[in-house]
Image: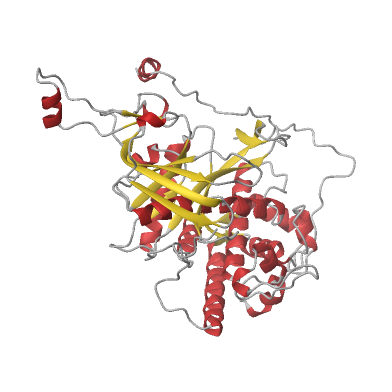
Amino acid sequence: MAVEPILTHMTAGVPAPSREGSRIEALAELSKFRQEFHACLTSRRDELFEMVEAVLCADGPVRTLVGLALTPEHRRGHGALYGAINHGRIEIARLRRALATVPLPRAAGERIVLAADVTPWLRPDAPTSPERLFCHTYGRRKGDHQMIHGWPYSIIAALETGRTSWTTVLDAIRLRPDDDEAAVTAAQVRDLVARLIEADQWRQGDPDILLVLDTARLAFLLDDLPVEVLGRLRCDRVLSRRAPSRHEHALAHPGGGRPPKHGGVFRMKDAATWGEPSHVTTTVTSRYGTAVASCWDWLHHRLTRRAAWLDHEDDLPVIAGTLIRLQVEYLPGERDPKPVWLWSSATAITAAHLDRLWQAFLRRFDLEHTFRMWKQTLGWTAPKLRDPYAADRWTWLIIVAYIQLGLARVLAPDLRRPWERPTPPERLTPARVRRGFRHLRPRLPLPAGAPKPIRPGPGRPFGSKNRARARHHDVGKTTKRAETLTEHRSRKG
């Protein structure tokens, strides 16, 4: 899309250095991160470190976990590999702090744009794996939705600007059967913002961090943080306008009465209820034609005491924001594209802010490229692990590998195939950076020690069988949420 003049990639507020100086800084940053990652490993550290090296230097996609033991960078046997993934330990808190210190991409005005999304690790054929949930997936046909057993992970990443497949993943949490997704995401964002402030990535006076997701409840849960929430709404929603003041209510109702809490309604499917928009902008794009964005200020959702708001003891809040309607001229594969409705927790926005918001929302789909890279190339969902904590350990190793690819973007050589076009170093894809990481590795610190020769264990006696049957676990939520306020109060009483 031709939106580069509005959203420009900027570094940490310093003039752009020369290419050689940039390479020296990138090499120092990557070396520092590798040393800190090795220090975060508290048990089986050398093996866990070499597993990440094998993921980065393997030829082609990672298909199996045991296949990593065949790479030259992995100097230990396959038994050590499985022992590390099942019994190793990672100091997650320290690793999260290390991720918060890596250079973050910035939007216009030095703004940090974060995106939160949930992606599943599907395990439909693992009845002995605990804490599996029903994960929403799309089938092979268009509009075919399926619910498949697996482990869902909530991922938060910093987004770049422009057309790119890169993101900077900063945190990951596996959702458990008793978790409330909105509450877990709110706590996850709160902790991440605190780490970014501690790492001096955000200072007082900087623009609020833009968080792109799809729930209005987070705008209330994160109200005390320097965060602006932007999410997508269904096209059949009904919102409310600002309630009239006491003076306006007294003029309209001389006989008195209680002032209303909500104003007139805004039905997205009824254009007669829209009224005049606050701003209308038109942008010519190369992919979608002419994009027209309109916004209406001070609209809010009319909350009810159901689902997530059952535990709210005070009066239900009025979460005011700005409603945005984005209409493009055409979409690939669609003749008559439908409008996209967005809601921002910011009010009284300008026309330039309006353009930045809908363009930032389009960048949210870059997370899909990250998930595809994890699953199809780095082998995130390839291991058939039974223990969910081993899955968490492997997930953090994949995040570390992906972060190292991002730090090595200007360092790795471009080993392109004969049919591929030459690409500038700053435009290399994650897969092409990984292709040249093996040639970069000798210039980086290798803190993992050499393996010690040992004698293999006796193993299971010949002819014996494992007669201890593994326990089978149910799938889904273990605690059913109350549907009504009466049911909720009866449970608490």
Say above or below: 348 vs 39: above
Residue situated in front as seen by the camera: 317 or 130:
317
**Residue sitting at 9 percent across and 20 percent down?**
254
Residue in the picture at 49% in, 47% down: 116
Measuring from the top left, give residue 134's x and y in whole percent. 61, 31
Residue positioned most to the right: 463
| Relative height, residue 12 to residue 364 (above, below) | below
Q: 471 or 132, which lies in front? A: 132
> What residue is at 55 percent from the left and 28 percent from the top?
477
Q: Position of residue 330 (x, y in %)?
A: 58, 46
Say which residue appears at 65% left-offset and 33% top-offset.
143
- Residue 433 in view here: yes
Q: Position of residue 26 (x, y in %)?
A: 54, 76
Q: Quadrant of the C terminus?
A: top left
Q: Nearer the viewer, residue 95 or 447?
A: 95
Quadrant housing residue 300: top left
Quarter in which the N terminus is drawn: bottom right
Position of 382 with respect to 205 (left or right) is right
Q: Is residue 192 visible?
A: no
Above or below 241: residue 408: below
Rendered location of residue 61, percent (x, y): 75, 57
Count of numbered marks: 0
Q: Place residue 201 in its image quadrant.
A: bottom left
Instruction: Say how the picture is coloured.
Output: secondary structure
